[in-house]
Image (spheres, rainbow, N blue to C red):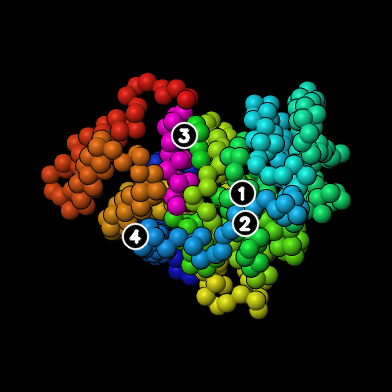
Amino acid sequence: MKNFSKLAFLVESFTGTSNDIVGQIKEIWTQLKAPLVVPLLTTLLTICLVMSIMLFIERVYMGLVTGYIKLFRKTTEKRYKFESFKDDIELGSSAYPLVLVQVPMFNEKEVYELSIGAACGLSWPADRIVIQVLDDSTDPIIKGLVQVECQKWASKGKNIHYQVRDNRKGYKAGALKEGLKHLYANECEYVAIFDADFQPEPDFLMQTIPYLHHNPELGLVQARWKFVNSNECLMTRMQEMSLDYHFKVEQESGSSTYAFFGFNGTAGVWRMAALDGAGGWQDRTTVEDMDLAVRATLKGWKFLYLGSIKVKNELPSTFKAYRYQQHRWSCGPANLFRKMVLEIIRNKKVTLWKKLYVIYSFFFVRKIVAHIVTFILYCVVLPMAMMVPEVAIPKWGVVLIPIVITLLNAFGTPRLLFLELSVGVFLLICGSLDFSFGQYRYYIYLYLQAIAFLVMGSGYVGTRVPNS
């Protein structure tokens, strides 16, 4: 109560007639700093440090799991039966299951030919595969081009269907859901999904469908992404490092330990029974792929990640496209977690350990804590601490832990760890240690040298790397 009275007095004095506004602001800051700002900032710092430790432990744990898999070659696919389909003289092509390939599109002028061509080039008996192009384009010219491309492949004997809607309700999820309503789609046993900028290799179905066909407990097989434009600019290189970590560590560890991971929305094959049993596609969040994966795992289905199978695609090369993508990936999971946390807790078909993994590791630490601590610690607490020296910032929390996490992320892309990058990282560590414990401020020089080596190691010395 005393503090509130003091605050009221300060506000009243600030609104007086004195011309010394700056002096009044300093006085208010001095009076509020000790009773209000310091405790608040200390609390935020404590929360951020706890979150950083949680994130650090999670990254180390996933790294150990992935290292164990690589060291002892206990890859997840070895747990499941795999037997290639063979031509049968008596059964003919009917020995192969019916497969639906969905290719959702939206104004894809640059890549529609490549994506449709890749889908039509998949190795599978022609009478056992259905290709469905779901065109939500709003540009009539692009719609016409896509339709002509589908007609071209249909004239070559491909079973391809060009589907459009009157509206874009539900966006991608709505298009996929609408596509499954057709009679020919309901007859298929499996459905493969490829976004418009993805081009699978011809043997993709031959490498994935057998796992689903011979292992009835599997509901999803997810392949890895291969980035064809990773060298286009520095932003695409950094995205490659981040996403390589996601696939090589997060997806691999989730698949091997709990047979669960988030569906990436593309480059995967679903068992139609698993998709329908989970309630199909829903448009209640912006991460419809993750939503479907969580609902399917609550029904008891297992997932398999195949890191050896790669599907080519392109990374966002402009900041506007990258920002839109990251906003969707950041906000969507938190919204989904809010809607599903009670459903996960009450579920009876999933083990307790798997529930803890989904709630704590998959959602809370990776999708919520990681984003909160990054913003609050580095954009709020640290800048404010410069004006409040009474709040002590431990160097291990803002220097050492982020360095270790960054190195763990970098290990997912070994081709980036060349001599220059290794030296740059070494100098960065030395500079951080000097910043934390040194007395002579050598870190200024060391940081500049580290930046120079990292720039050279990334191939950027004042020139733009052309898109190859």
The disc labelled 2 sits on which kind of residue? Pro
Which numbered disc, 2 or 3, marks the residue closer to the eye?
2
Residue 110 visible within the image: yes
| Residue picked out by circle 3 | 230
Q: Is residue 26 left or right of residue 277?
A: left
Q: Earlier in the sequence, mark 3 or mark 4?
A: 4
Residue at position x 50%, y 33% in the image: 228
| Residue picked out by circle 2 | 210
Which numbered disc, 4 or 2, marks the residue closer to the eye?
2
The disc labelled 3 sits on which kind of residue? Ser
In the drawing, what numbered circle is on residue 101? none
- Please tell me how crowded label 3 is: few (under 14), some (14-19), or many (20+) other residues with Cα within 10 Å: many
**In the image, is residue 242 part of the stretch drawn in magenta?**
yes
Above/below status of 27 relative to 47: above
The disc labelled 4 sits on which kind of residue? Leu
| Residue picked out by circle 1 | 206
